[in-house]
Image: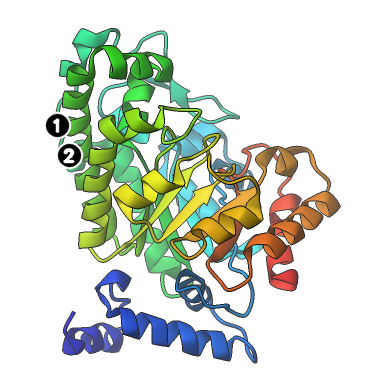
Amino acid sequence: MPIREILDHVFKGRIPPPRLLPETLLDLVAHLSSARGRISELNSIERLLTALRHKEPDHVPCTALMGGACRRLIGASFDEFSQDADVATRASMLALDLIGGDVALLGLDLSVEAADLGQPIIYPKNSTAYPDYGNPFISDHTDYCKVKRIEIKEAPRMQRVIEMARRSVEAKGMSKVFVPVVSSPVSVLGMMRGAEQVFRDCVLYPKEVMAALEVVTGVLIDYIDALCDAGLIAICPDMLFCARSGLGQELWEEIEGPFSRQIADAIHRRGRFVVIHNCGDGPYFDSMIRFMEPEAITFARLPDDCRDRKALKKRYGDQTTLIGNVETPLLQEGSPYEVMEECRRIIEDLGDGGGFVLAPGCEYPPNANLLNAVVLVETARRYG
């Protein structure tokens, strides 16, 4: 980006897409923020950028990844949160004010894209929306051809997330970082067919699966472009099945790997950060980094090639920023003291030298005690 365009963004009060800025400028900003953080408090954007450039901010950045759990702050049911952008936005903004954190998760649930592509969805009052697997859009391998390209402006659930993003940026965009979750292509098909059936079809009918993945990827890229237009500086592809609990590593690289690269390239072309989410068991960090070059990976469990958190930091800590890995069962069932102690241990293992954000391994449990979210954020502030 020419320097006059950067100055134009600055003078007009807009944040330029970070990856369009020169690397040397990003490093300079992070270095100065790290120095200033020793004597004064940074804002969330400064804190996160400093950590992403592997410098130490005033304290470890954090996020409680408050998805549908924040609905309880305004007394909304889950079905209202999932289907009403106004409800979701008000709940998310209040969570930022009351619970805090540097990064806010944007989204309704993981079935958004599949719903707009034709999959019937069930909306419970007190838990996450999910596909009606008794009525799958793809009932056998011959149905993959039914997956058709759609216009984002005619996709009501994706439009709700886009509206949520636009309103969030307008409200707090100069002080917080908002990151929307976008399902991976295989995850979308898993919502429309069932994950185990899709895994089997990847082996038996790869041609049919990949034809559908190409269509889905085109829709996801259009969706990503619309989210970037809303003013977001990072996008979070959910690569759930790039893990031992999903597809085999070679099969993932063959089937979804090329489409994941297209998605990451689309995000990077717009100057935004790629923040991968993977809450699978034994995620393939090496594959995700090779195909997607992410600025950060949010994870629940250790990669398949790391025995502990310190080994993870040593192997991948200079290649990407690590986000996680507070276990969600602990947030659901643990005491505030237990949560605080575990967060302190994670910070000790992963926080040195920057390149780390404290967070749950997955979305905050929708019906867990919200006090533990406050404890997570406060632990990062006090001990990070």
The quadrant of the rendering that contains the C terminus is bottom right
Residue 323 percent across, percent down from the top left:
54, 56
Q: Foreground: 250 or 31? A: 250
How many marks the image carries: the answer is 2
Residue at the image point whose x is 31% and y is 78% from the top = 23
Q: Which residue is mark 1?
A: 149
Q: Is residue 127 above or below residue 318?
A: above
Q: Foreground: 124 or 366? A: 366
Q: Label 1: state its secondary structure.
A: loop
Which of pointers 2 and 1 lies earlier in the amino acid sequence?
1
Q: Label 2: state its secondary structure.
A: helix
Q: Is residue 3 above or below residue 66?
A: below
Residue 64 percent across, percent down from the top left:
61, 54
Residue 95 in sight from this viewpoint = no
Residue 5 percent across, percent down from the top left:
18, 84
Q: Amino acid at mark 2?
A: Gly
